[in-house]
Amino acid sequence: MTYVSHPLALGALVVVLGLALYLVATVKIRVRAAVPGRAGQLHAEIGELKKRMDELAARQPVPATDGEREGAPAAFASAPPSVPLRSGINLSRRSQALRLHRRGETPEQIASSLMVPTGEVRLLLKVHRLVMEQTMAGPPRPGLKSGPGSADTFSSAESAP
């Protein structure tokens, strides 16, 4: 503890603290001097961005009227306005829609109860009907060869005398 009370140690401490205070003050002055130039640059960038936003807003199409949605397919235009448009119909909703259709509900009733567009329900029912028709008809069978080189025993048995 004797070195703290030494006059040279106290002098060195005062010099170091003075130097630190000087450095802090100069850095603070430099930062304050740089801010107005940067603020002007930021204001210019903000003004340019506002100008671009106004241009984009001017190019934006006018919303459609008479219940049609701008840029939407006709299937979505037929959906009632109270039904929010969703990105798609998931597997659970598909099975619910098919179950409701088997019970005899119309596509409009199914769409309103599941909160999906009517056109999407109609498309689902149409695809389901096509798949069921193909399933009932069975897969197409290739023509079977008949004759002595055939591996088909039934056709070769029929051709035998």
Image (cartoon, rainbow, N blue to C red):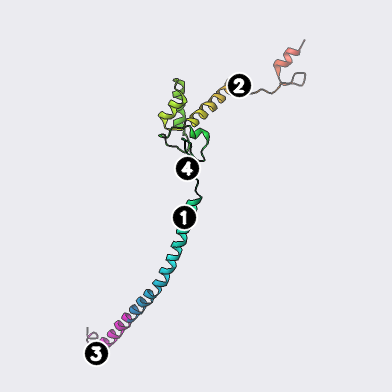
Q: Which mark is residue 155?
A: none
Residue 134 in picture, x, y percent from top left? 59, 23
Please, what is the dominant secondary structure of the magenta stretch?
helix
Q: Residue at x 50, y 40 (%)?
A: 70
Q: Which amino acid does label 3 sit on?
A: Pro
Q: Name the residue under label 1.
A: 54
Q: How far apart are marks 2 and 4 (CA)?
A: 48 Å
Q: Which residue is drawn at 33% across and 81% down?
A: 22
Q: Is residue 12 left or right of residue 50?
A: left
Q: What element carries label 2?
A: loop
Q: How far apart are marks 1 and 2 (CA)?
A: 60 Å
The stretch drawn in magenta includes residue 8: yes
Q: Which of marks 3 and 4 is in front?
A: 4
Residue 26 versus residue 61: which sits nearer the camera? 61
Q: Mark 2 points at which residue?
A: 138
Q: Nearer the viewer, mark 1 or mark 3?
A: 1
Q: Mark 4 points at which residue?
A: 63
Q: Earlier in the sequence, mark 2 or mark 4?
A: 4
Q: How far apart are marks 3 and 4 (CA)?
A: 83 Å
Confirm whether residue 96 shows in the render: no
Residue 142 in picture, x, y percent from top left? 69, 23
Confirm whether residue 69 shows in the render: yes
> Which residues, given as a range, are shown in magenta?
2-21
